[in-house]
């Protein structure tokens, strides 16, 4: 299974009547089992790109090749839970075929067991995020899309959730697309990093990470980050010269 | 408890007023109760009440289901909204009396004409309320349902309907009170039975006790339906909201 993204452009007409270019030509592909990370400054058009890839926005130039039978699991920036359904119902409505044992396992990993019957309005943002994660994993997705799933969480919780995401991604073959502005998350979770420019977004650099995710210790992660810093620095000097 | 007290106060004021203005204009509570019992024992009270309730039920169901469907469509589809809007404004501002009289002229003094006329009076407000509700639907949840490939019916039932429930409840409540009022006019003008017909007779005979007996029984039934049906539905629809302090 393979996801091919070939967007040649996307403009948006503002209420004032002007047209704004949101996306420059963007082209990349993802294989099953890979974690691709889109990193870019906020407001650069990452969410627009995701909406196009997910088929929510058809008003763009280009082509998305996504296996039509592929199941999608998505964690939106805001949890987007149904406030009038309990935590368990929220998950089951998105994943009606999920086995009881699988659901129990997910709730155990994400520490949601005590909250099964709570309504989303009774949860903290961190908990709601975890429910959104549980929902995305319960559908056993072929394509997993995570839009800033760790934003505005404290470091400790973000770290734990990140480990949980890594565990869950490793547990089954799934292609994952992670959107983040945190280099740390990107380096810890990603197989290939796509650095995006400010608006209109285009891919400035594509960086594969050779070391398998579970073999990355703190030392390796620091080394990769240092390498990336050097690289962006190098890019900048190159541009300065030219 | 407080409700009972409030009801007792109402009875007391009525009684005192009756003593002040005299029984011909305002009969005392026992006098009205006597008429109620007399009418009840012959069965006439229940017959008329039943006829009115049946009309209310039919017209209300018709207007609510049709109005909700049209309102939802107009909220979702821009073209439908554009096409329907002038009709809606016309219907909203058409006096109830005009609709009823025209219905009787065109369709004769029939049951169908009466029910249609009542339903048409309620229809536009149901449409407007549901259209507003549909416009206020949360797009981000629609997107969620679409990304997770929820089948249409499941998405409608679990994503859309709970958002519309407060609007449906509001429309039902205001609609019911509208229908209660209009059904009596329709009966007064063109039906041979029902509470409205009885009130018409009582008016012609200046029979105040009879007039009050029928209208108060009717009001009591409305109150019971409101407490036993409409309020529990509203409470259920809002169950998930965190309790207000």
Image (cartoon, coloured by chain):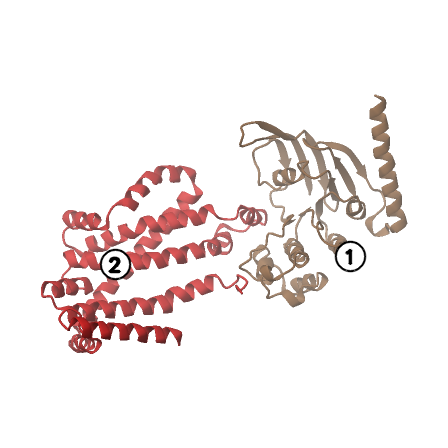
Chain colours: A brown, B red
- Residue designated by label 2: B181
Q: Report x, y in % for residue B41.
A: 17, 78
Q: Residues within 10 Å of mark 2 (few under 14, many from 20)?
A: few
Q: Circle 1 marks a residue in which chain?
A: A
Q: CA distance from mark 2 to mark 1?
A: 63 Å
Residue beneath the point at 53% across and 46% down = B139
Left or right position of A19 against A40: left
Q: Report x, y in % for residue B37.
A: 19, 78
Q: Circle 2 marks a residue in which chain?
A: B
* Tag nearer the camera, 2 or 1: 2
* Residue at the far left in the pictured view: B205
Of B53 and B231, which appears nearest the observer? Answer: B231
Left or right position of B210 against B92: left
- Badge 1 marks a residue whose secondary structure is helix
The circle on residue A156 is: 1
* Residue at the far top in the pictured view: A242
The circle on residue A96 is: none
């Amino acid at each position: 299974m393979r996801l091919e993204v070939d967007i040649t452009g996307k403009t948006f007409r503002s209420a004032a009547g002007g047209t704004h270019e949101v996306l420059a030509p963007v082209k990349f592909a993802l294989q099953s089992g890979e974690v691709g990370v889109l990193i870019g400054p906020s407001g650069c058009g990452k969410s627009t790109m995701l909406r196009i890839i997910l088929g929510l926005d058809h008003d763009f130039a280009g082509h998305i090749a996504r296996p039509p039978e592929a199941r999608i699991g998505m964690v939106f920036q805001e949890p987007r839970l149904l406030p009038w359904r309990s935590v368990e119902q929220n998950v089951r409505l998105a994943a009606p075929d999920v086995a009881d044992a699988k659901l129990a396992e997910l709730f155990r990993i994400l520490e949601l067991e005590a909250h099964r019957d709570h309504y989303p309005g009774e949860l903290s943002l961190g908990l709601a995020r975890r429910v959104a994660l549980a929902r995305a994993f319960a559908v056993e997705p072929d394509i997993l899309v995570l839009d800033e799933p760790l934003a505005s969480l404290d470091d400790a919780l973000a770290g734990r959730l990140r480990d949980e995401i890594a565990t869950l991604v490793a547990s089954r073959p799934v292609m994952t697309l992670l959107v983040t502005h945190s280099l740390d998350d990107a380096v810890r979770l990603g197989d290939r990093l796509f650095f995006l420019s400010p608006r209109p977004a285009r891919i400035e650099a594509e960086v594969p990470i050779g070391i398998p995710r579970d073999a990355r210790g703190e030392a390796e992660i620091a080394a990769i980050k240092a390498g990336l810093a050097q690289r962006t620095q190098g890019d900048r000097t190159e541009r300065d010269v030219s | 408890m407080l409700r009972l007290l409030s009801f007792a106060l109402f009875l007391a004021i009525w009684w005192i007023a009756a003593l002040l203005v005299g029984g011909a204009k305002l009969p005392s509570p026992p006098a009205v109760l006597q008429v109620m019992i007399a009418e009840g024992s012959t069965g006439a009270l229940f017959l008329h009440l039943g006829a009115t309730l049946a009309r209310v039920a039919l017209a209300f169901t018709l207007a609510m289901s049709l109005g909700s469907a049209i309102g939802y469509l107009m909220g979702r589809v821009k073209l439908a909204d554009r096409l329907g809007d002038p009709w809606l404004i016309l219907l909203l501002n058409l006096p109830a009396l005009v609709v009823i009289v025209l219905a009787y002229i065109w369709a004769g003094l029939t049951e169908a004409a009466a029910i249609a006329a009542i339903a048409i009076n309620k229809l536009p407000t149901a449409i407007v309320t549901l259209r507003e509700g549909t416009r206020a639907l949360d797009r981000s949840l629609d997107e969620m349902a679409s990304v997770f490939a929820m089948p249409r019916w499941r998405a409608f039932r679990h994503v859309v309907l709970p958002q519309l429930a407060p609007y449906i409840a509001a429309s039902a409540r205001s609609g019911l009170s509208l229908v209660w009022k209009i059904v009596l006019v329709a009966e007064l003008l063109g039906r041979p039975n029902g509470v409205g017909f009885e009130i018409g007779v009582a008016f012609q005979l200046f029979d105040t006790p009879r007039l009050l007996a029928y209208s108060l029984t009717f009001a009591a039934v409305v109150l019971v339906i409101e407490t036993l049906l409409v309020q529990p539905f509203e409470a259920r629809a809002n169950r998930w909201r965190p309790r207000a302090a």
